[in-house]
Image (spheres, grey):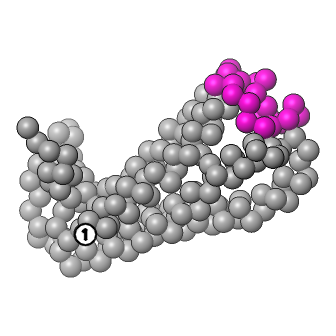
Amino acid sequence: MTSHATVGASQTVPGVSPWLRRLAQLTSLTVLPSCLWRLAIAVGIPMGWGPGSDLHHAYYPGRESLVLILVCVLQECLGLLSLGLVQRWGEELPRWIPVLGGRRIHPLAAVVPAALGAIAVTAVTVLGAWTWSEVNAANPDAPTGLALRIFDLSYLPLLLWGPLLGVLTVAYWRRRRIHGRRTEIRW
């Protein structure tokens, strides 16, 4: 029987420190609280939005729930991609993938989207956090009190997503330039 530590160690590549592995795991988890908040709305749990808001619980569950669920799935998939910056599948496609399996991934194919994503997510989340109080003050149907605190706590981790992704991207680029040229990866 294989232990969890052995499985985790076998998925990483040379040059990835344990703290980078933990950082990648933390980065992938930064999207989870906001997704849980959205899913609560999607199933009709009141999250503090007033009747004049599109997010009022009277509209959910329903057709609109699919949009919230799809946003959550997309966001979670993007969050999980940060794990590829420290694991083997971020350097070479697994052999079980038809036609492309076993091919090495060019470093720029991961670095460019990850860097652009880190910049975009940082800009969007910082701008959103900066302007939220103005938006909230202008919208009488926005959450207040405890509902606002739950919203804040749900979205606060997203402020870390972009910067942490940036750190992982730089580490990936440096590692691939130093260690990644001729490293054989076996699945």
Is 66 displayed left or right of 110 in the figure?
A: right
Q: Amino acid at mark 1?
A: Ser
Residue visible at 60% across and 33% down in the picture? 39
Image location of residue 163, percent across then percent down: 51, 69
Q: Residue at x 78, y 37 (%)?
A: 48
**Residue closest to the far top:** 62
User: Whole-percent x and y of residue 17?
Assistant: 25, 69
Vertical comparison of 105 with 76: above or below: below
Reading the image, the residue beneath label 1 is 17
Q: 70 and 33: which one is in front?
A: 33
Residue 180's image quarter? Answer: bottom left
Part of the protein shown in magenta: 43-64
Q: Main secondary structure of the magenta part?
A: loop
User: Residue 48 in magenta?
Assistant: yes
The residue drawn where x is 85% and y is 59% is 134
**Where is the N terminus found, in terms of image quarters?**
top left
Residue 62 position (above or below residue 92): above
Q: Magenta span has 153? A: no
